[in-house]
Image: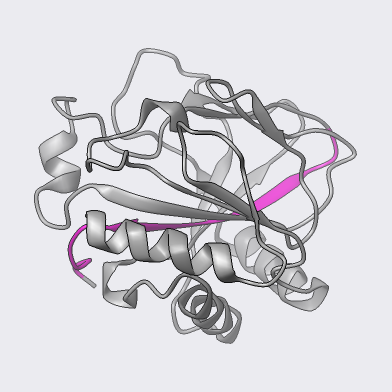
Amino acid sequence: MDTVTDSVAARLARYDGMQRVPHPKIEQFQLKDFIGPDLCAELMRLIDKDRRPSTIADANGDDYFRTSETCDLDAGEPAVKELEARFLTLGGIDPKLGEPVQGQRYDVGQEFKAHTDYFTPGGADYEKFCSHSGQRTWTFMIYLNAVEAGGATRFKVIKKTFQPEPGKLVCWNNARPDGSVNPATLHHGMKVRKGVKYVITKWYREREWPW
């Protein structure tokens, strides 16, 4: 994993307009206006078309832990093809390592409580989700719209909060430099207080995804 993540961080740091979060415990970046309003609008339309209740990998007994809706976006859609091309240009990660692009929709009162994107080693579903493609490496997340109130993403450990802005990208390495999972990536998709929030998420793995 080290070779992949090191090259990604270096590439991101050189990208025009990219801002690195200045914290020693995490490799994290943000880029405003990564995608334009037309692409944002089309992706929101696709999410609305096929959304379903979100789930989590390891059930924890909290039925309100993740209350958003999710959509697996069709890789054949022109908007998704354009998005994937932008991800490749930006991070340079082999598309074979990527999971399908997902969209999330948060209505008023919906949230995703503090969680990590990696699969917890030793967790109930760790082998199920990691046996073929390995652990998640990088997360790329894009806000598709502004939210009237609430809906921020809060990284509690590093005390960093990102507010939704149309087209803004936030990305981070889910691993430490030694390749172990990084608990400092713990983040909370906070409740939407007014309006609706749309988000795109793209995850990458250590090994090829079984398309």
- Foreground residue, 65 or 169? 169
Residue drawn at point x = 30 percent, y = 49 percent: 136
Coordinates of residue 107 in the picture (x, y in percent): 73, 37
- Residue closest to the far right: 148
Q: Is residue 197 left or right of residue 86?
A: right
Camera-side residue of 95 and 185: 185
Q: Which color mode does the image show?
A: one colour
Image: magenta residue range: 194-210
Q: Residue at x 17, y 51 (%)?
A: 134
Q: Position of residue 54 (x, y in %)?
A: 48, 40
Q: Residue at x 53, y 65 (%)?
A: 12
195 part of magenta stretch: yes
Q: Where residue 197 appears, x then y in whole percent?
A: 73, 45
Q: Is residue 143 visible?
A: no
Seen at 80% across and 52% down, the residue is 165
The residue sitting at the top extreme is: 61
| Quadrant housing the N terminus | bottom left
Quarter assignment of residue 180: top left
Q: Is residue 102 left or right of residue 33?
A: left
Does 113 lie within the magenta span? no
